[in-house]
Amino acid sequence: MIFFDDLLKDDNIHETVSRIAYDFREKYKFPEVRQLGVIVADVEKAAAQLEEKGIGPFFIASDKLKSWNERGENRTFSGKLGMAIYKGYEVELLEPGVGSDFYRTCVDEKGRMVVQHLGFLVKDVDVYRTQLEKAGSQTWVRGTIKSFPISTEFAYMDTVQQAGIILEFIDM
């Protein structure tokens, strides 16, 4: 597991993040890491802790996603997230939510913030998703967030065995 506090201890977070799954990302020519997906038990509490450290402010929202396909099964997922920018990265705090165990399995029993995934902004999620599927990585979750007038497509890839972490493609 990668703990967010460990990334914050490094004077050069960009160097530390660039080492995560570096060989895998280079092999498939991914764009730069733009997002750090951080799993927390409580978004408001985690956001307050990070804001005390000078990270934030966080925008906090909750929603019910009807477009959540997990390992080929359509589900409805409800969850809460917090978003902030830190040193050029979008820090996305995510609670476990209801309707899936996708985030829940990464909640740390000691309450530490776990970096579950790296996110990449792309123009077409399915181009990257298909590329990784052909290379043996399955799509874990494929979904859409619709919040008028914005629509965000995303795909979480099961790259833990190959890259050591989940990778997410995001198209806003």
Image (tube, grey):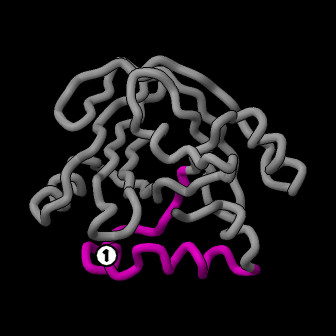
| Residue 140: percent from left, percent from top | 27, 44
User: 17 or 126, which is in the foreground?
Assistant: 17
| Residue 9: percent from left, percent from top | 75, 73
Q: From this view, report whether residue 44 is shown above or below residue 66.
A: below
Residue 119 falls left or right of residue 38? left
Q: Residue furthest front?
A: 109
| Segment colored magenta | 11-37
Locate residue 82: give its quadrant. Answer: top right
Task: Assign a secondary structure to mark 1.
Answer: helix
Residue 87 sits inside the magenta stretch: no
Q: Residue furthest right?
A: 52
- Kindly identify the residue that appears in the image at 35 percent across and 37 percent down: 153
- Kindly identify the residue that appears in the image at 76 percent across and 80 percent down: 11
Total number of numbered labels?
1
- Kindly identify the residue that appears in the image at 84 percent across and 48 percent down: 51
- Kindly identify the residue that appears in the image at 68 percent across and 69 percent down: 6
Residue 72 falls left or right of residue 50? left
User: 105 or 75, which is in the foreground?
Assistant: 105
Q: From this view, report whether residue 78 is shown above or below residue 9.
A: above
Q: Which residue is mark 1?
A: 24
Q: Residue furthest left?
A: 134
Residue 18 sits inside the magenta stretch: yes
Crowd band around label 1 with a 10 angstrom C-alpha radius: few (<14), some (14–19), many (20+)? some
| Residue 112: percent from left, percent from top | 68, 52
Q: Amino acid at mark 1?
A: Phe
Locate residue 163: give its quadrant. Answer: bottom left
| Residue 65: percent from left, percent from top | 41, 21
| Quadrant into which the C terminus falls | top left
Residue 129 falls left or right of residue 46? left
User: 93 or 34, which is in the foreground?
Assistant: 93
User: 4 or 154, which is in the foreground?
Assistant: 4
